[in-house]
Amino acid sequence: MHAFEILADPVRRRIVELLAGGEQAAGDVGAVIQSEFGISQPAVSQHLRVLRENGFASVRAAGARRLYAVDAAPLQQVDRWLEPYRRFWLQRLDALEFEVARGTRARRTSPSTTDPKGNIT
């Protein structure tokens, strides 16, 4: 499976988000996913298996628990694939940063007043 096929599924994306915060027990991941998506424990296990088999997650045994962690290698491949396209949004982010800074300077230099409803003008 291609990385984008794996990440196209919202459940798997959410699992990767959870694991990005650090290693987690399968049961803890399952509880969050079941509550957010309303799917069964076996369905969560299937998504974890897909992530594991495609290199997005690793698992280790700790007694009876299975601890999952994100594996960055496939995400680095996605990052490399996206590199040529960053210019499309970096220009816009730079422009947004400029406008925010300009607006902040304008608010600091102009006296603010309030209208009858209490809105700052």
Image (cartoon, rainbow, N blue to C red):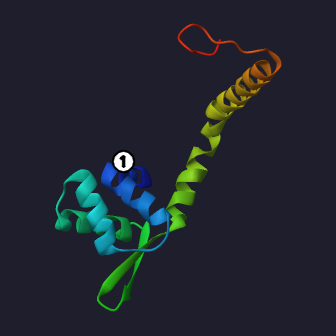
Question: Above or below — where is 9 with respect to 75?
Answer: above
Quadrant housing the C terminus: top right
Work out whether residue 1 can be spotted. no
Q: Residue pushed farthest right?
A: 109
Residue at the spot 38% in from the left edge and 55% down from the top edge? 14
Residue at the spot 30% in from the left edge and 69% down from the top edge? 49
Q: Where is residue 26 in the image (x, y as percent from the top left)?
A: 32, 73
Residue type beneath disc 1: Ala
Quadrant housing the N terminus: bottom left
Work out whether residue 68 can be spotted. yes
In-front residue for pair 47/77: 47
In-front residue for pair 99/89: 99
Residue at the spot 57% in from the left edge and 15% down from the top edge? 118
Q: Where is residue 85 in the image (x, y as percent from the top left)?
A: 60, 37
Question: Above or below — where is 12 with respect to 26?
Answer: above
Q: Is mark 1 on a helix, strand or loop?
A: loop
Q: Mark 1 points at which residue?
A: 8
Question: Above or below — where is 78 with respect to 56?
Answer: above
Q: Quadrant of residue 63?
A: bottom left
